[in-house]
Image (cartoon, rainbow, N blue to C red):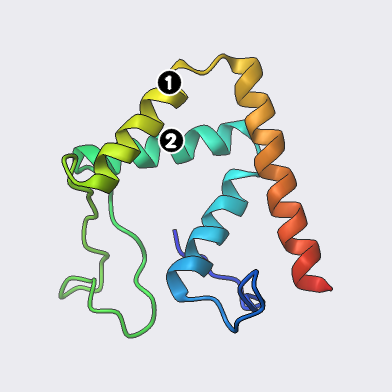
Amino acid sequence: FYGTPAAAKSNDDGGGPRSPPSVALLARLRRASDSVDSLVDLLDEWHSLLDGTHGGCPALPGSAHVDAAGNPLPASVDRESRFGVYLRRLCLGMEEIPFESLGRLWTAVRGYCDAEEEGREA
């Protein structure tokens, strides 16, 4: 999940380095922009976060989110929390989206990620 690139330089506002969660989420979004199937895989991860079957995220160095054997702890989102309700709404919307619209969404996500890369290199 984290797969954080070493080139994670700064916030969009130029206010300094990105936080580790921001870097991790951007890296995951980049992987989701590889193909329409990768975007659908992201939706599956959201579902697993809601139903408690997500296998957890690899821990960042020094993280306490691993068991005694070093395996990531399971991750979940409370379905009734604000974020859980928001995530459920996103999942429902994605399930009902026509394939043509999913293709347009993937194109937009890909464009965002490409623009992010160009901005970082500038």
User: In the rendered image of this protein, does residue 21 appear above or below residue 14?
Assistant: above
Q: Which quarter of the image is occupied by the C terminus?
A: bottom right
Residue visible at 40% across and 33% down in the picture: 90
Q: Against 32, is 97 above or below?
A: above
Quarter of the image with the N terminus in it: bottom left
Q: Residue at x 81, y 72 (%)?
A: 121
Q: Which badge, 2 or 1, is on the more N-terminal residue? A: 2
Which picture quadrant has residue 14? bottom right
Residue 112: x %, y % from top left: 70, 49
Which residue is under mark 2? 43
Q: Are marks 2 and 1 in contact (CB under 8 Å)?
A: yes
Looking at the image, residue 94 sits to the left or right of residue 35; the answer is: left
Element type where label 2 sits in the image: helix
SS type, badge 1: helix
Which sits in the foreground, 12 or 117?
A: 12
Q: Residues within 10 Å of mark 2 (few under 14, many from 20)?
A: some
Q: Amino acid at mark 2?
A: Leu
Instruction: Give x and y (percent) for residue 92.
Output: 37, 24
CA separation in Å, label 2 and label 1 = 9 Å
Q: Quadrant of residue 63?
A: bottom left
Q: Position of residue 118 (x, y in %)?
A: 81, 63
Check the image and report above or below for 50 versus 31.
above
> Seen in the image, is 96 located left or right of residue 11?
left
- Mark 1 is surrounded, within 10 Å at the Cα level, by few (under 14), some (14 to 19) or many (20 or more) other residues, namely few
Q: Position of residue 76 (x, y in %)?
A: 22, 50
Which mark is on residue 65?
none
Residue receiving disc 1: 95
